[in-house]
Image (spheres, rainbow, N blue to C red):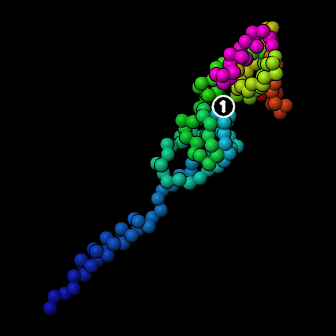
Amino acid sequence: MRRPPYLRWLVAGAVLLTGLAFESRGASTVLYPFADTPIPAGATAEGTIVWREIPSQMLPEWTGDVAGIVRTDIAANDPILPSQIGELLAPSDWWAVALPLPAPVTAGTHIRVVLADNTVVEGIALEGANDTGFELVGTVAFAASHAPLVAQAASNDALVVMIAADTPVATPDG
């Protein structure tokens, strides 16, 4: 009578346990930023981010902080991709116009311009107000459909620039 094949049973059991351990281990996950609320193009993502676990390598990896200006509109609960955040302060299809600006305006400030016909147009400051010696002037981006109206009104001094009452005032010591 032959001895039972203990070695074969041992190898088969080891293969079975290894496969079971491999299948039951959790997939590696990473924390990824998602928009908690809709984020419009030109806004910052800070304060509107919720971090969720997703399988690793599912989306492009973040190498730094989620800081900067949102380049495209991001819907609530959508992932925030690295390509959607950058230094671009206004959407790429907007046009820039030089306007007289109040002192507290800095790059990224959302402003409203009231034209002579009472049309209200929203824009994003691409740079802060710079002193030209005569007045404070800065560059503001507007949607392509509104930029010609604002440029014409600016050339005729027929507009008023408004900023939010809670816009922080820049101080000399930062």
Instruction: Name the residue at 28% across, 77% down.
Output: 10
43 or 114: nearer the eye?
Answer: 114
Where residue 161 appears, x then y in whole percent? 80, 21
Q: Which residue is mark 1?
A: 42
Is residue 78 visible in the rendered image? The answer is yes
Q: How many marks?
A: 1
Q: Image point 75% across, 9% down: which residue?
A: 155
Direction front: furthest residue: 117
Residue 142 point in image, percent of width and height: 68, 23
Extent of the magenta region:
142-158
Q: For residue 45, what is the image quadrant?
A: top right
Rendered-image quadrant of the N terminus: bottom left
| Outermost residue to the right | 165
- Which residue type does callout 1 highlight? Gly
| 142 relative position to 21: left or right | right
Q: In the orientation shown, which residue stands out farthest toward the left? A: 1
At x 39%, y 70%, the residue is 20
Residue 78 image position (x, y, % from top left): 59, 46
Picture coordinates of residue 18, whole percent (x, y): 36, 68
Give above or below for 129 relative to 73: above
As drawn, is 57 to the left or to the right of 127? left
> Does the magenta segment cover residue 151?
yes
Q: Is residue 49 visible?
A: no
**Front one among 66 and 97:** 97
Q: Quadrant of the C terminus?
A: top right
